[in-house]
Image (spheres, rainbow, N blue to C red):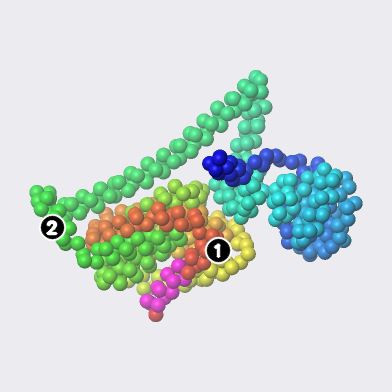
Amino acid sequence: METEVLHKEEIEQLEESVNRLFPVFLKLENLEVLLVGAGNVGLEKLTAMLQNAPNTHITVVAGKVSDKVKHFSASASYVTIIERDFEPADLLLKDIVVIAVNDKNVSQEIRVLAKEKNLLVNVADTPGLCDFYLGSIVQKGSVKIAISTNGKSPTMAKRLKEVLNAAIPAEINNATDNLHIIRNRLNGSFATRVKKLDELTRGLVEKDNAEKEKQWKRIATISITVFALMLLGHFIFSYIPLKEFAVTAVDWSKTLDRNFLWMILAGFLAQMVDGATSMGYGVTSAIVLMSANVSPSAISGSIHTAEMFASGASGYSHYKFGNVNKKMFKALLIPGILGAVLGAVLLVKLGESHISYLRPAMAVYTLFLGIKIFINAFKKTNVKKKFRHYGWLAGVGGFLDSFGGGGWGPIVSATLITKGRTPRFVVGSVSLTEFFVTLASAFTFFTLIGVQHWQVILALVIGGLIAAPIAARLSGKLPKKASFILLGVIVVLWSVRILIKVL
């Protein structure tokens, strides 16, 4: 008997967790809406309705109408504002009632009166009194997606809206229009037309997505394999004679630096910071390596090569966890690679005398950006500004990263975030691009001057590979405010450290 009771309770809990709402799209402009309340919540409800259906007839009733509501309604010719307390007569000839007053008892009374007239009711922040919810909306032209969490978490709905807005391209509206034309031209029954359209769209989606994913995976795999084989061959033929392989393998393990574990820790911590923020790899690894008494020349020569492997693992992890904006990635890729190659060639040809002048200028620029990011963390909204110079930004970032000894993440990520781009997708996209940028830079250095300090490189790579998936997952989980604070702190510390060394 007890088992049966427990089983029923488990079923009831499971049923409560299932979203049983039936999604519909109302032609709101054909209905009469009553909005009771005109404060911040009322403004939010009014904005949501008019953004989706601008010609909706809405009557706003409130004892006090906020200036924001008045200002917003001034340009909406179908909105009527009545500044007085609610009266039962306000329900006449209405189809939908939205209640946004900060008094639960008043909300309950209005709802009872509305239900007596068989009206649909939404009560703000009170799911139990609602007949329907106003979900978050993603719109790309004719395509509209409504998101519902069954009234449990509006914040989650907003986060999903951000993800879908970034993931769904604006071109989907053009594709929808084209499919509409194709649909009108198809002959046959309704079922036949639906089947043909289904086959057509399935083929386009599967082919496009599969080809793009295979293409970038193939490029990344070939690139990392070729470079890894080059490094492996260099190590084998330089340090381990093939005739004495067995004996040398044992002796080699004894030759490892006594600080080898500290070096692995440096790679792990550096990748945790870089993977979560797309910056700070060089700063973090350099600090830990200096603490382990690694020579400055070994630090400088090893970080760039090791960062290529770490950024590859980080970029793949970000891609896997959905943190990459493909359009941003494509815009940054080629210019970043060209800038990195040019910077590496000039560095080898001209030497390092320029760095004492170049890095302070970079530090001043990124310090300004870091402070701006930190301030934005405490603003209510982060306005997205127009930015079209992705190519120039990536080219400069790649060049300075090679020629100036670092700065890809602080320069590119910080600039994009101060322009209002979502930190999660900036970090993911810049991290994935960083793999190809550092690969181009490392390949150029390897071709021109070879590889030194292999123990430091190996330790950094091991630590970075361990940390990469953890950091990528952390990036997707961090709240927006925490992301801004962390990014701002990293950029400021990176900049201040350079300025202190100079001064």
Q: Mark 2 to mark 1: distance in Å?
A: 51 Å
- In this orientation, does residue 238 appear? yes
Total number of numbered labels? Answer: 2
Q: Is residue 73 at all visible to an observer of this figure? A: no
Residue closer to the observer: 190 or 217: 190
Residue 483 image offset from top left, x and y in percent: 51, 62
Residue 438 falls in which quadrant of the image? bottom left
Let me know if residue 495 is in the magenta part. yes
Classify 158 as above or below 496. above
Above or below, comparing residue 146 to residue 72 in the picture: above
Look at the image and give the residue range highlighted in magenta: 490-502
Give the side of residue 310 with respect to residue 176, left or right.
Answer: left
For the point 57% across and 47% down, the residue is 164
Of pointers 2 and 1, the one earlier in the residue sequence: 2
**Figure quadrant of the N terminus:** top right
Q: Secondary structure at mark 2?
A: helix
Q: Quadrant of residue 253?
A: bottom left
Q: Position of residue 67 (x, y in %)?
A: 79, 64
Residue at the spot 65% in from the left edge and 30% down from the top edge: 181
Q: Which residue is most to the top?
A: 188
Q: Measured from the top left, where is residue 183 in percent x and y?
A: 64, 28
Number of residues whose C-alpha sits closer than 10 Å to that of mark 2, classed few (under 14), some (14–19) or many (20 or more): few
Q: Residue at x 16, y 61 (%)?
A: 254
- As helix, strand or loop, the secondary structure at mark 1 comes to helix
Q: Identify the residue at the far bottom of this view.
A: 503
The main secondary structure of the magenta stretch is helix
Report if residue 376 lies within the magenta region. Answer: no
The residue identified by callout 1 is 481
Q: Which residue is mark 2?
A: 251
Outermost residue toward the front in this view: 1
Determine whether, in the image, residue 184 is placed left or right of residue 488.
right
Residue nearest the viewer, comparing 58 with 21: 21
